[in-house]
Image (tube, helix red, strand yellow):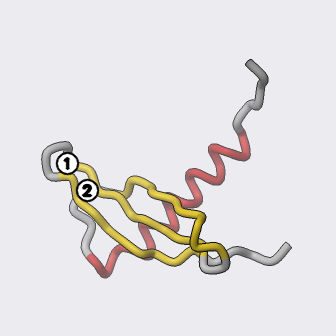
Amino acid sequence: MAASTLTIVGLSHDIAQKKSYVNFVWANDPSKRLGLEVPYGLSLDQIEAEARKSVDALSGELAACKLELP
Protein backbone atom coordinates (compact mmCIF):
# COMPACT_ATOMS: atom_id res chain seq x y z
CA MET A 1 0.00 0.00 0.00
CA ALA A 2 1.40 3.38 -1.01
CA ALA A 3 1.85 6.06 1.62
CA SER A 4 -1.00 8.54 1.89
CA THR A 5 -0.47 12.24 1.42
CA LEU A 6 -2.22 14.50 3.91
CA THR A 7 -2.61 18.11 2.85
CA ILE A 8 -2.65 20.67 5.65
CA VAL A 9 -5.66 22.85 4.88
CA GLY A 10 -6.16 24.83 8.04
CA LEU A 11 -4.83 26.07 11.34
CA SER A 12 -7.17 27.47 13.95
CA HIS A 13 -6.70 28.93 17.40
CA ASP A 14 -9.28 28.73 20.18
CA ILE A 15 -8.30 31.73 22.29
CA ALA A 16 -10.82 30.96 25.03
CA GLN A 17 -9.48 27.43 25.58
CA LYS A 18 -5.90 28.31 24.56
CA LYS A 19 -5.75 25.44 22.07
CA SER A 20 -4.72 25.23 18.43
CA TYR A 21 -5.76 22.69 15.80
CA VAL A 22 -4.40 21.72 12.41
CA ASN A 23 -6.76 20.30 9.79
CA PHE A 24 -5.82 17.78 7.10
CA VAL A 25 -7.48 16.40 3.97
CA TRP A 26 -6.31 13.24 2.21
CA ALA A 27 -4.92 14.20 -1.21
CA ASN A 28 -6.42 11.13 -2.91
CA ASP A 29 -9.79 11.26 -1.09
CA PRO A 30 -11.03 14.74 -0.12
CA SER A 31 -13.93 13.22 1.83
CA LYS A 32 -11.41 12.01 4.43
CA ARG A 33 -10.54 14.72 6.94
CA LEU A 34 -8.63 14.86 10.21
CA GLY A 35 -8.20 17.54 12.86
CA LEU A 36 -5.50 17.30 15.52
CA GLU A 37 -4.42 19.50 18.39
CA VAL A 38 -1.03 21.20 18.11
CA PRO A 39 0.76 23.55 20.52
CA TYR A 40 -1.24 26.71 21.21
CA GLY A 41 -0.30 29.81 19.26
CA LEU A 42 1.54 27.88 16.57
CA SER A 43 2.99 30.12 13.86
CA LEU A 44 2.79 29.36 10.15
CA ASP A 45 6.46 28.37 9.90
CA GLN A 46 5.97 25.73 12.61
CA ILE A 47 2.90 24.01 11.13
CA GLU A 48 4.54 21.17 9.21
CA ALA A 49 6.85 19.99 12.02
CA GLU A 50 4.18 20.18 14.72
CA ALA A 51 1.57 18.57 12.47
CA ARG A 52 3.98 15.67 11.88
CA LYS A 53 4.42 15.25 15.64
CA SER A 54 0.64 15.15 16.12
CA VAL A 55 0.14 12.61 13.33
CA ASP A 56 2.94 10.42 14.72
CA ALA A 57 1.45 10.58 18.23
CA LEU A 58 -1.99 9.58 16.94
CA SER A 59 -0.48 6.77 14.88
CA GLY A 60 1.30 5.38 17.94
CA GLU A 61 -1.83 5.64 20.05
CA LEU A 62 -3.92 3.84 17.44
CA ALA A 63 -1.30 1.13 16.91
CA ALA A 64 -1.28 0.38 20.64
CA CYS A 65 -5.03 0.59 21.21
CA LYS A 66 -7.17 -2.31 22.31
CA LEU A 67 -10.17 -3.12 20.14
CA GLU A 68 -13.27 -4.62 21.69
CA LEU A 69 -16.90 -5.24 20.92
CA PRO A 70 -19.62 -3.74 23.12
Q: Secondary structure at mark 2?
A: loop
Residue sitting at 14 percent across and 45 percent down? Answer: 16
Farthest front residue? 31
**Amino acid type at image mark 2:** Tyr
64 displayed left or right of 10: right
Crowding at dot 2, Cα within 10 Å, few <14 / some 14-19 / many 20+, comes out as: some
x then y, percent, for residue 12: 27, 63
Decide which of 19, 23 is in the foreground and name it.
23
30 displayed left or right of 24: right
Q: Secondary structure at mark 1?
A: loop
Residue under label 2, please give it. 40
Residue 68 position (above or below residue 50): above
Q: Name which of mark 1 and mark 2 comes first in the sequence.
A: 1
Q: Could you tell me if the residues under marks 1 and 2 are in contact, i.e. CB atoms within 8 Å?
A: yes
Corner quadrant of residue 49: bottom left
**Amino acid type at image mark 1:** Lys
Farthest left residue? 16
Q: CA distance from mark 1 to mark 2?
A: 6 Å
Residue under label 1, please give it. 18
Residue sitting at 70 percent across and 36 percent down? Answer: 65
Residue 6 position (above or below residue 68): below
Quadrant of image for the C terminus: top right
Residue sitting at 63 percent across and 44 percent down? Answer: 61
x then y, percent, for residue 6: 57, 74
Residue sitting at 64 percent across and 53 percent down? Answer: 59
